[in-house]
Amino acid sequence: MEVMKQLRQRAIRDLVEQRPIRTQQELAAALRDRGFRATQATISRDVAELGLGKATREGRQAYVLPPRLRDQEASGEDRLRRLLADVPVEFRIANLMLVIRTLPGSAHAVAAALDRTRWPEVVGSIAGDDTVFVATSDRTSLRRLRDRLLGLAGSR
């Protein structure tokens, strides 16, 4: 599977887990917000390949992951470890922010996995196409976050 398709389908899985998505149009808009451009036909294929179903969520019918995908969901840290092993990354410190540079199209996946870890050092993150800005509350948190990410990336 090509990298962009994997990243797009990963984003779809994350979106469906995070909030109720009722239609393919809502899914397309949410993907656009994350930097993915996809036609309705592509989204339809992704929905079918992922085996998304519909169930009642917050009082409405919305997409849900099939049991096979829910059961194999890895922790945010596991996902982050796999991503950092698969794509080159560079870490830079800018005041109380950690700047993560990666391949074009990969930043959203890295940020989503990082957010999913729910590490206390991370106040929040913003992803562009190839850059993630991660806010921390103090220098100690910043160094600890950088060290954890370097460890996951195997760069220590």
Image (spheres, grey):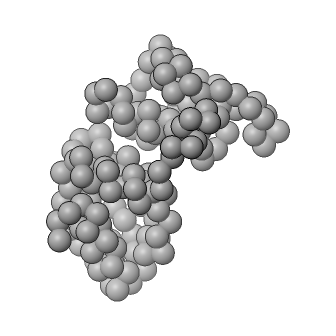
Res 115 visible: no
Whether residue 127 is situated above or below residue 61 in the rendered picture: below
Whether residue 21 is situated above or below residue 125 in the rendered picture: above
- Measured as percent of width and height from the top left, residue 3 is found at 28, 33
- Measured as percent of width and height from the top left, residue 31 is found at 47, 34
For the C terminus, the quadrant is: bottom left
Res 154 visible: yes
Whether residue 125 is situated above or below residue 143 in the rendered picture: above
Q: Residue furthest top?
A: 41
| Residue located at (31% from left, 49% from top) | 83
* Callout count: 0
On the rendered structure, is 24 left or right of 146? right
- Measured as percent of width and height from the top left, residue 119 is found at 46, 70
| Residue located at (24% from left, 60% from top) | 153
| Residue located at (45% from left, 56% from top) | 76
Q: Nearer the viewer, residue 45 or 137?
A: 45
- Measured as percent of width and height from the top left, residue 14 is found at 52, 43
Q: Quadrant of residue 147?
A: bottom left
Q: Nearer the viewer, residue 63 or 127?
A: 63
Q: Residue furthest right?
A: 59
On the rendered structure, is 4 left or right of 38? left
Q: Quadrant of residue 136?
A: bottom left
On the rendered structure, is 41 left or right of 5? right
For the N terminus, the quadrant is: top left
